[in-house]
Image (cartoon, grey):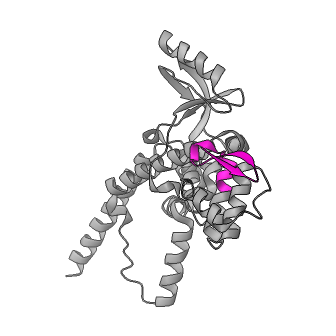
Amino acid sequence: MIEAKINEILIDIPTDPVEISLDKGLVIHSLWTSEEHDNVTKKEILKILTDLDIWEDVTETSIEEIFSYINLIDPCQKPQVLCPTLRLFKKNYGLHLFDEITVKEFGELDFYMNYLDSPVDSLDKICSILFRPIKHKNNNLKNIFINIYSKVFSKTVKPLMFKNYSIESFNEKHLDNSEYFRKGFSFGMAIGVLYQFSNWMNLLTKEFEDLFEEDYEGATDEEKKEEEISFAQNWGFYHTFITVVPELSERNLWLDKNIKEFYKYLVYINARQLANKKNVNHGDR
């Protein structure tokens, strides 16, 4: 936060992602990625940051000087603060352990990570999937005092500490919480979640890298091949899941299983198909 004097008025201007709401951060991110980085756009961003419509006559030099302190235009360049448990609008939320993500949860997350131009645009949905209401928790005396302090002195988002906790199982109704995260969550906290989850997804891809190697051998029609590749890329994990498990009854059995268990199943399917192909080729000789 910096203090600037505009038209003889001292104004506090947020300069860091943790100082603004997710709602404001999404609007600013959209402006910066879709508009020219000119003085008009910068004035509009300052209007959003300060909730003041006083920037029209401010000189370009002054605008540039203020923007030299602002560190929230491209927040994905560095990790932001991540708070795994918090209180938001009188309800306790806990961050889902990434290694316990189910097939259903991963399908939703993969969709919102790739649905718009940038996963930042879907941060409210991503947070509402990964952060869910806490249903059980255990604590110790130290954490109890820390939580009391947080509830008294923190403003909208109140960071909490628990010895351990469990969260509600995911269902589509949790996506309705996205509005709470837009209004009450900080942009910096949301970026922290995205940064950590993106790292985990990269590790998952590396762990099962054989599944993500592009192999279009056997395609004879170039135009058809390109259409199929484009379709698969657009629908991502959902396309893979429907293709591998076409029967609805079988898909329902997979939804609550761990995503890594499903990927291991895919590894097995690929290995079995390769073995069958080798056996067929051997029999043709």
Above or below: residue 228 compared with residue 157 = below
Q: Is residue 30 above or below residue 252?
A: below
Res 4 seen here: yes
Q: Residue 261 versus residue 208: which sits nearer the camera?
A: 208
Q: Residue furthest right?
A: 53
Left/right placement of residue 243 relative to residue 178 reads left
Label count reads 0
In the image, 244 versus 144, the foreground residue is 144
Q: In the visual, does 14 lie left or right of 82?
A: right
Q: Which residues are magenta?
A: 1-27
257 or 70: nearer the eye?
70
Q: Which residue is depicted at the point 39% across and 78% down? A: 216
The picture quadrant where one finds residue 120 is: bottom right
Seen from the viewer's position, the closer of residues 253 and 153 is 153
Q: Residue at x 36, y 62 (%)?
A: 211
Magenta stretch encompasses residue 282: no
Q: Position of residue 44 (x, y in %)?
A: 72, 62
Q: Is residue 220 above or below residue 104?
A: below
Any part of residue 111 in sight: no
Q: x, y (%) of residue 228? A: 52, 78
Q: Residue furthest top?
A: 141
Q: Where on the picture, by quarter, is residue 280?
A: bottom left
Residue 279: give x, y in percent of width and height: 25, 70
- Quarter of the picture containing the C terminus is bottom left
Q: In the figure, 233 relative to 24: above or below?
A: below
Magenta-colored stretch includes residue 25: yes
Residue 210, by quadrant, is bottom left
Place of residue 284 in the rendered image (x, y in percent of width and height, measured from the top left): 24, 81
Quadrant in which the N terminus appears: top right
